[in-house]
Image (cartoon, helix red, strand yellow):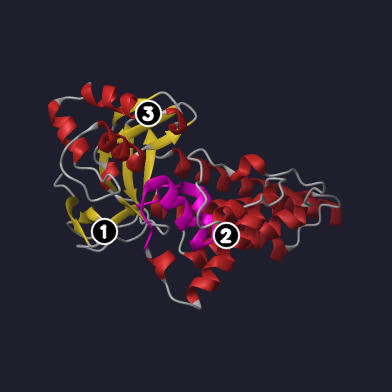
Amino acid sequence: MAPLWDSRPSPGKGNGMMALEDIEPGNLILEDKEALRIYAPSTHIAAADVRAAFDRLSAEDRARFLLLSDGQKTSDDYDNARLLRIFETNNFEDQYGCWIYLLICRCNHSCQPNAVVLISEQGEQLYAETFIPKGSEIYISYKGAIFRSLTARRRQAMMRSHKGFTCSCPACSMPNPGLMVSDMRRTLIGGLWYALQGLEVPDLSLLDDPIAVIPNDYDPIATARHRQVRLSEAERTAYYYVLARLEQAEGSSPYWTAAYLREAATYLLYQIADPPHVVLPRSAQYVRDWMKEASMLTDSVRPPHSQEVKSMHQQCNNIEAALAKLADESQAGLD
């Protein structure tokens, strides 16, 4: 298959990954694999660690590594300081350590990404999440889910501190009143999400300090306190539904809209199933409509063989069977 992308200059960002043809949502853009992994949290990784890992790469992979951005406009030398900057600017991180992709890491960041990295048994793959026109840039989010609930100023503070640049994506650079509305949506997304996790919204004031140094392992979720009051099933239904529509309005991946619609449908079903088992046709139709939309959205941004698609289809079938059973029990109670 001919490549769908090429590395070309991106205004203000060095090089970026550009689409060579129209790419539909859910299409595979490229496959990649880890090239350099260090089994330590990013806060514990020094220049000497990156240098040792770099020296173990093949000559070809070392050349590819040096093509990645270092967050600054510097020479082509590969002294230890520059190698560390490249690693800090481009690495992915989980509980086991940090790593670099030599192809995927050529994607620049956006707070409204049009592509996502999926990990499967076949390796790491980059998929389109929205329609990407020929000649436009392919973006991923460097910070994942946490950015969907932060205001533009707070997102930019993290990117400056962690990656060495100020984000100028459409979500961060739109003029008011659009930016104000976007910030309000994302703040509400965060509030609803934390409530659904049984948590209070954490203190985010560190992100509002223009001179603060934000630790690489900064995790507001870890500092959130537990809520004293549990949400009812009706509240969970409403919160998940509003979350789905907020994500949709904010231009997030359809995957998140689908995930929250599925949860809203599930909690509405729980309410229908409570005694006296009287199934209201309108409530049952909401469950069906939300699951149908969730399934269609998931199908549009995930490959057919993916676990996400299989799981969504299975849940649709399970919910339809549960509604049919409840309708039979409701009818039997009326007879």
Does residue 219 show up?
A: yes
Instruction: Point out the stretch of residues depicted in magenta.
Output: 140-168
Q: Is residue 176 magenta?
A: no
Does residue 294 show up?
A: no
Q: Position of residue 252 (x, y in %)?
A: 46, 59
Q: Identify residue for label 2.
A: 244
Q: Earlier along the polypeptide chain: callout 2 or callout 3? A: 3
**Can you say which quadrant of the picture contains the C terminus?**
bottom right
User: Which type of secondary structure does the marked residue at label 1 adopt?
Assistant: strand
Q: Identify residue for label 3.
A: 46
98 lies left or right of 19: right
Q: Are marks 1 and 3 in contact (CB under 8 Å)?
A: no
Q: Identify residue for label 1.
A: 137
Q: Amino acid at mark 1?
A: Glu
Q: Amino acid at mark 2?
A: Ala
Q: Is residue 264 above or below residue 220?
A: below
Q: Amino acid at mark 3?
A: Ala
Q: Position of residue 209 (x, y in %)?
A: 55, 56
Query: Which circle marks residue 308 in the picture?
Result: none
Q: Position of residue 191 (x, y in %)?
A: 66, 57
Furthest residue to the front? 211
> Crowding at label 2, few (<14), some or many (≥20) Cα neighbours within 10 Å?
many
> Crowding at label 1, few (<14), some or many (≥20) Cα neighbours within 10 Å?
many
